[in-house]
Image (cartoon, rainbow, N blue to C red):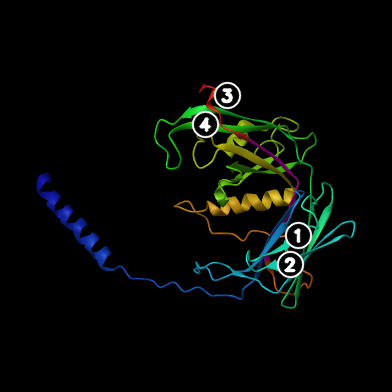
Amino acid sequence: MKNKAYPFYILLALTSMAMLTGCEDVIDLKTETGPSQLVVDGWITDQPGPQTIRLTLSAAYFNNSPATTAVGAEVLVTDDEGTDFPFSYNPKKKSYEWIPAQDTLALGHIGRTYTLTVRYEGETYVATNQIKRVPRIDSLAYEEERFPIKPDKGPQEGYIAQFYARDFLGLGDTYWIKPLKGGKLNGTEASAISLAFDGAFSPGSPSDGLIFIQPLRQSITVNGLFSAGDTAGVELHSITPESYYFLLQVRQESANGGIFAVPPANIPTNIQNVKPNGKKALGFFGASAVSRAETVIDPKKAKPKS
């Protein structure tokens, strides 16, 4: 009797699947398109040479076209000693630039506070940030590595590079670690942002005044292993705690997907309209001191795989 029951359940299951398939409807999701907002992408440093600030306009959620540049703005950076640094629009780069009188001159200096002022379409926006101290990079090292399974990016065999630097004594130092390859930034996607809080990942860790922990040191090896002859490097940027939490949320939102995704949240901005009821802006204005080091991968000097 039991064997005779199986075809009935199979038929019932197939019928249910057919009904579910036949009831599929195409939903055309329409979203409201609000007014565009000014988006500020500005980060000044203590490095000599030109400085760049990018201004664009926000677009509709499903608009995948390149961002529209906000042309015709007045852009000015002023330090806490009253020195003005005007930025001019460069149509070739579609950004605003400050060009020093000499290539050896720098806009930013450690300990100074900088205010950005942007005037655009009758609105005035301001933001303030400070350049914090940055540790010296003591050295760069690399060792042989072989992955048991071929990775999606890079070779299966190669070298893991890491940097050595020591956090300053005193709680609250925050950093942005930028990997370099061939003298250029490597791993520029938001999900690859590497941040440190007192030499560790987050506040509360017993890492104040110590050498950066190994996962952070090795975070300069991204997008696959290095090969012999490659130039590996790092830029260590000092940032304010406000900048740290802004970048942390940027990284979190960029990885917000899959079955465990949560509703996206607006990322806080330090760009404020001087008029309380004026148009809002998006983005961030940051400032950093930079410590940089590079080395060429030499197999004869590499540490053997442990």
* First-in-chain label (4 vs 3): 4
* First-in-chain label (1 vs 3): 1
Q: Which residue is mark 1?
A: 99
Q: Which residue is mark 4?
A: 159
Q: Are marks 2 and 3 in contact (CB under 8 Å)?
A: no
What x and y, as percent, mark residue 1? 9, 46
Estimate the spatial distance between the alpha carbons at disc 4 and disc 2, rounded to whole Å. Answer: 43 Å
Q: Are marks 1 and 3 in contact (CB under 8 Å)?
A: no
Residue 287 is inside the magenta segment = yes
Q: Amino acid at mark 2?
A: Ser
Q: Amino acid at mark 1?
A: Ile
What x and y, as percent, mark residue 292? 69, 40
Q: Is residue 191 left or right of residue 72?
A: left
Estimate the spatial distance between the alpha carbons at disc 1 and disc 3, rounded to whole Å. Answer: 41 Å
* First-in-chain label (2 vs 3): 2
Q: Are marks 2 and 1 in contact (CB under 8 Å)?
A: yes
Q: Which residue is mark 3?
A: 301
For residue 127, the mark is none
Q: Are marks 4 and 3 in contact (CB under 8 Å)?
A: no
At label 3, counting other C-alpha atoms closer than 10 Å, the crowd grade (few under 14, some 14-19, many 20 or more) is few
The secondary element bearing badge 2 is classed as: strand
Q: Are marks 1 and 4 in contact (CB under 8 Å)?
A: no
Estimate the spatial distance between the alpha carbons at disc 1 and disc 4, rounded to whole Å. Answer: 39 Å
The secondary element bearing badge 4 is classed as: strand
Residue beneath the point at 64% across and 59% down:
267
Estimate the spatial distance between the alpha carbons at disc 4 and disc 3, rounded to whole Å. Answer: 11 Å
* First-in-chain label (2 vs 1): 2
